Image (cartoon, rainbow, N blue to C red):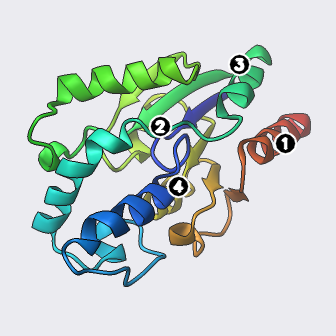
Amino acid sequence: MRIGIDIDGVLTDIEKFQIEYGSKYFYKKNKKIINYKGNETTDIFNINLKEDDLFWNDAIKHYIKEPARNYASEVIKKLKKEGNEIYIITARTSNLTYTDDIDTKKMHKLVRKWLKKYNIYYDKLIFSKEDKLEICLENNIDIMIEDKPKNINDISKKIPVICYHANYNEQCSGINITRCYSWYDIYFRISSEKDKR
């Protein structure tokens, strides 16, 4: 099976980072959390795109140091050992307007370094657009592990999606969508799916 894996929100806990680091950053600007279920800081803190760019210009140097989720490396290695192909598909560089000092090339390097640091195995690393359906289809992905609501809903129309649970995606449900809460929960679901084949 060919497994697609997102980075932000799946390998990392971007929800926690945006709320925690965002609270600190926006406290200085006298802004508070308006919607803790928001997917983006624009929703969480009710800010405009320019303010969001300024936030990420400051935050990215901290975010790229965030650790991988517990057991992600371990589970991915198990999946690979069982004969699956691992495709990391990230939109991390699709909108680098938020960073003055990190260009696309540098971000690609930082992502590779981060994957190596946290021992995340992959057969192929794909830097994609925000909309990942086309990439999944082009690469014959059998199942995608994703957290972004739009991607979950779009991809699930064509292939199965494991929705990595977050407050901002709790409305995602339906045919081809399986909600998971941890990396071993993902492993259990994928193993169960393979047993059905």
Query: Which residue is under mark 3?
Result: 80
Residue 92 seen anywhere in this rendered image of the structure: no
Look at the numbered disc 1 and give the secondary structure of its residue: helix
Residue 79 seen anywhere in this rendered image of the structure: yes
> Label 4 amino acid?
Asp
Q: Is residue 59 left or right of residue 171?
A: left
> Label 3 amino acid?
Lys
Q: In which quarter of the image is residue 112?
A: top left
Which of discs 3 and 2 lies nearer the camera? The answer is 3
Q: In which quarter of the image is residue 49?
A: bottom left
Whole-angstrom CA distance, mark 3 to mark 2, is 21 Å
Badge 2 local density, few (<14 within 10 Å), some, or many (20+)? few
Query: Which residue is under mark 4?
Result: 147
Query: Which residue is under mark 1?
Result: 188
Query: Which residue is under mark 2?
Result: 137
> Label 2 amino acid?
Leu
Whole-angstrom CA distance, mark 1 to mark 3, is 14 Å
Whole-angstrom CA distance, mark 4 to mark 2, is 18 Å
The quadrant of the image that shows the C terminus is: top right
Look at the numbered disc 4 and give the secondary structure of its residue: loop
Look at the numbered disc 3 and give the secondary structure of its residue: helix
The earlier-in-sequence mark between 3 and 2 is: 3
Q: Which residue is drawn at 87% across and 42% down?
A: 192
**Where is residue 118 drawn, in percent x and y?**
55, 24
Pointer 3 and pointer 2: residues touching (CB < 8 Å)?
Answer: no
The earlier-in-sequence mark between 4 and 3 is: 3
Q: In this view, does 137 lie to the left or right of 40?
A: right
**Where is residue 5 drawn, in percent x and y?**
55, 37
Look at the numbered disc 2 and give the secondary structure of its residue: helix
Q: Residue at x 60, y 47 (%)?
A: 159
> Label 1 amino acid?
Phe
In depth, the one of 166 and 1 nearer the eye is 166
